[in-house]
Amino acid sequence: MKRRLQALSGCLIIIGSICFSNLAAQTNPVIEKKIDALLRRMTLQEKIGQMNQYNGFWEATGPAPKDGDAKTKYDMLKKGLIGSVLNVNGVQNVRKLQEIAVKETRLGIPLIFGMDVIHGQKTILPIPLAEACSWDLKAIEQSARVAATEASAQGINWTFAPMVDVTRDARWGRVMEGAGEDPYLGSKVGVARVKGFQGTDLAANNTIAACAKHFAGYGFVEAGREYNTVDIGTSTLYNIILPPFKALVDNQVQTVMNAFNVINGIPSTGNVMLQKDILKNKWKFKGFVVSDWASGAEMVQHGFAKDLKDAAAIAVNAGSDMDMESSAYIKHLEELVKSGTVPVKNIDEAVRRILRVKFLLGLFDDPYKYCDEKREKEALYNPAHQSKALEVAKKSIVLLKNEGSLLPLSSQQQKIALIGALANDNNSPLGSWRVCSDNNTAIPVVAGIQQYTRNFTYAKGVTVYQGIHDFIHEANINYTDTTGFQEAIALASQSQVVVMVLGESGFQTGEGRSRTELGLPGLQQQLLERVYAVNKNIVLVLMNGRPLALPWAAAHIPAILECWQLGTQTGNAIAAVLFGSYNPSGKLVMSFPRSVGQVPIYYNHLSTGRPDSVELVFWSHYSDEKNSPLYPFGYGLSYTTFAYSNLKVQSSNPTDVRVSVTVTNNGNRAGEEVVQLYIHDKVASVARPVKELKGFEKITLSPGQSQEVQFRLTDETFGFYNNNGQFVVEPGDFDIMVGTNSASVLSTHYYKN
Ligand code: GLC
């Protein structure tokens, strides 16, 4: 049976005047009039107060602070000198602070409450890097909807998500927070998350403002070292880093967070080109920019501002509207305006943007709309949220290897050894960004497996870390304790199949967790090889927050599942795949290296002048490693197999180009396949990548079923940004490729006039 599927891979863009479809530019005239009226009534101090954001400075349900920094901030709150707070959670705490802002200040302007609801509030969904591997935009949107429903029920009306930093370097701890190495996929995933958070009615009490972060380039920190310098070329900025941010602005993301790093030596918080020229003037962004945590003050450390006062002037004049936690604005802006260093129009512009979002959220109509204790109780850990969390977790798992169809396991006749502390860990699977959730609330693998069989025995084998969970440091990795080895090895030698759950602790990735090595931390590799020596029937279940370099496992272990950190429903999701009740369908969104020495490694690289192997050594390669990744972008297997055939490009006119391919399930069970479309612009005014993802479609096929999948190519597909930041479409010869991953494609040609 053939069914046509059409994947619109882009919208038509008219070149010449370069007019982009951009809904972000519209504002509501009624709200604008209200803002005008309010601005006219506000004192300069009250305006600056709106631009000042503080971290929750006391448990508001407790007694008011009597002294110290908290007392100072409490007094400022009552004077209307704080416009937003972050990390205040729970209806009672939020109501308490909101009552002070609304009832005790002169103008009663409500606060906006921000929080890092990165992948869930109480119910924790898979880390974003895992979710992106589902390539299922609907599931990703629904996942963000779950997070927004629970967060808004706890008084939160603004999340600092989605992070849309494209990154190619698994040494960087925050790769777990984004959607990997590709800007097209990163854009689609980011938009889906914004839609999930913001919904269709921002004034509803179950929708929250989203935040595109970190603007811009944070994912390119040199050597993957946290908070390090970023030094990138213009083409990378315009074609790789910026597109996801523009996609979110075009889809009405309400806030943008700038970044800690410099670009061309200019800190993002003080970067006029980024925040004013591109974001606000060219893209017509109408929301507000919030600094990252004290990133304004950090311009002094960057050597870009003399002192905090100088930093305040630079930041606000560059378009950073709200100051998170550096006190630069509240301490210095009034003086800077009076001295003429900062034009009051820059203050008014920033405050207008902040008030606009508060109006759009409905906070002026009802400042307590997010403060419903009954809803709070009903929403948190809600069963419907659990089933959604389970669904998206299963879809996030990537099958990397399944030699001899060792998987799926039978729940009957096999004696299973389950080895690894992570198999019984109900905390690590929550990841490091579980800010509002409760520790130890993940369903561990042990519990998940019990739903399929009791015929297994668990041994911890080796722990990944020692010491406390929170703010773990590399120093706590277990490099010494082998006391669990013998029990694990003995168990493995008496079992028919071994399931080893190995990887990273929940706090080995995330902010501040860069690593110089990408192997299994601690003694895990040693244990894996010792178990293999007595039983080769091993299923390696990886639980990690970044791509790992696992060449030995890839060469020896028959079955490998990449399970990431899947959140609350971890054990149930992994067991469903282990025992085959769900056929894995995930595809990698970041290349897995063979060695950390290859990093940064990514599929959409340029050709270089010497791409091909030639005699002797004079070509682009390493003398001790292949160039190719261990597992490429877009890679993932299934319990069935798929065949691609009949790739065609048809064009009735230059603006109607269609690519079609036939995909057949030639295995013996139903499965999902992510059909991927890539192009290669072979000659252009700026060298273009050897492959660029320009479309994908996730389809489900029964055994023996074939389906024709179609992609429509538009000027947006073929075009790119030149080094002046202009979107151009150039005639020329293109490779058109479709396949199951970036390294396995059918290819044909198309000449674009
Ligand atoms: C952190 C992060 C940012 C987060 C903010 C508030 O340093 O860089 O992503 O949203 O501070 O917690």
Image (cartoon, rainbow, N blue to C red):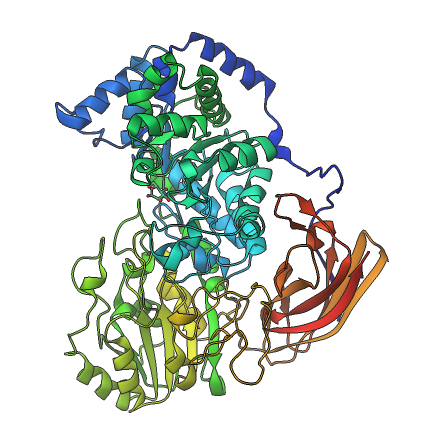
Q: From the viewer's perspective, tell me whether residue 220 is left or right of residue 91.
A: right
Count of picture labels: 0
Q: Quadrant of the N terminus?
A: bottom right
Q: Position of residue 719 (x, y in %)?
A: 69, 52
Q: Position of residue 339 (x, y in %)?
A: 36, 13
The reply to whether residue 409 is in sight is no
Q: Quadrant of the C terminus?
A: bottom right
Say which residue appears at 39% left-offset and 60% top-offset. 566
Q: Position of residue 206 (x, y in %)?
A: 45, 36
Say which residue appears at 69% left-offset and 50% top-offset. 716
Give residue 553's quadrant in the image.
Answer: bottom left
Q: From the viewer's perspective, tell me whether residue 206 is left or right of residue 498.
A: right
124 versus 736 height, above or below: above
257 versus 513 height, above or below: above
Q: Residue furthest left?
A: 67
333 versus 639 height, above or below: above
Q: 376 and 360: which one is in front?
A: 360
Q: Residue furthest right?
A: 652
Q: In which of the image's four quarters is ligand 1 placed?
A: top left
Give residue 6's quadrant in the image.
Answer: bottom right
The reply to whether residue 93 is in sight is yes
Q: 721 and 107: which one is in front?
A: 721
Q: Residue furthest top?
A: 41
Q: 112 and 72: which one is in front?
A: 72
Q: Position of residue 46 (x, y in %)?
A: 36, 15
